[in-house]
Image (cartoon, helix red, strand yellow):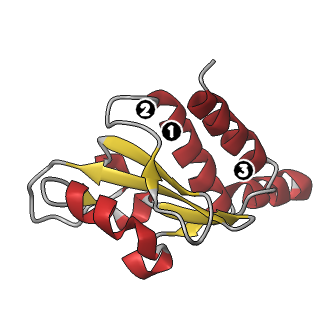
Amino acid sequence: MSKVLNFIEKLILRTDKNEIIWTMFEKVEQAPKIKDIYEYYTEDAYNIPGASYVTHYKDGTIVLLGLTFENSHKVLKKHDVEHLLLCLQSKPDTKMSELNTLKEYQTELFRLLNMIDRQVNEVDEFIEDFLTDF
């Protein structure tokens, strides 16, 4: 198993256990070093704010970008995501690096996206409360 794939699997596991907490990635200022990557991909693609997230681990920053190449004027939602890009900055004084191409690890990254979405929207807590109440 590649290190990147192993890293993604650990992100999924630690996100599921709420050991890593994600927030929506809404603007480049949340991870300033992603600016070059962000501008490169958004020349041809569109970032989907509702499907892009950021988290921090130790001194590093991890960003999951949801992208689409759909050229429409509608408001883009999570189900419009075509590709996911995982970016990592290991220390504040290092550059942000892409960990995958737009074709690599998409199945695993969509699993991670769904896990993050459940965490951010407190889906599991609601289900647990419902099951406890009934």
* Pointer 2 local density, CA inside 10 Å: few below 14, some 14–19, many at least 20: some
Q: Secondary structure at mark 3?
A: helix
Q: Which amino acid type is shown beneath numbered disc 2?
A: Gln
Where residue 78 appears, as percent x and y from the top left, is 38, 54
Split into 4 quadrants, where in the image is the N terminus?
top right
For label 2, the residue is 106
Q: Which residue: 44% across, 60% down?
A: 52
Specify which label sits upstream in the sequence, 1 or 3.
Answer: 3
Q: Which residue: 33% across, 70% down?
A: 35
For label 1, the residue is 109
Q: Are marks 2 and 1 in contact (CB under 8 Å)?
A: yes
Residue 72's place in the image compared with 86, above or below, is: below
Relative depth, front residue between 65 and 82: 65
* Identity of the residue furthest to the front in this view: 93
Quadrant housing residue 39: bottom left
Q: Secondary structure at mark 1?
A: helix
For label 3, the residue is 15
Q: Secondary structure at mark 2?
A: helix
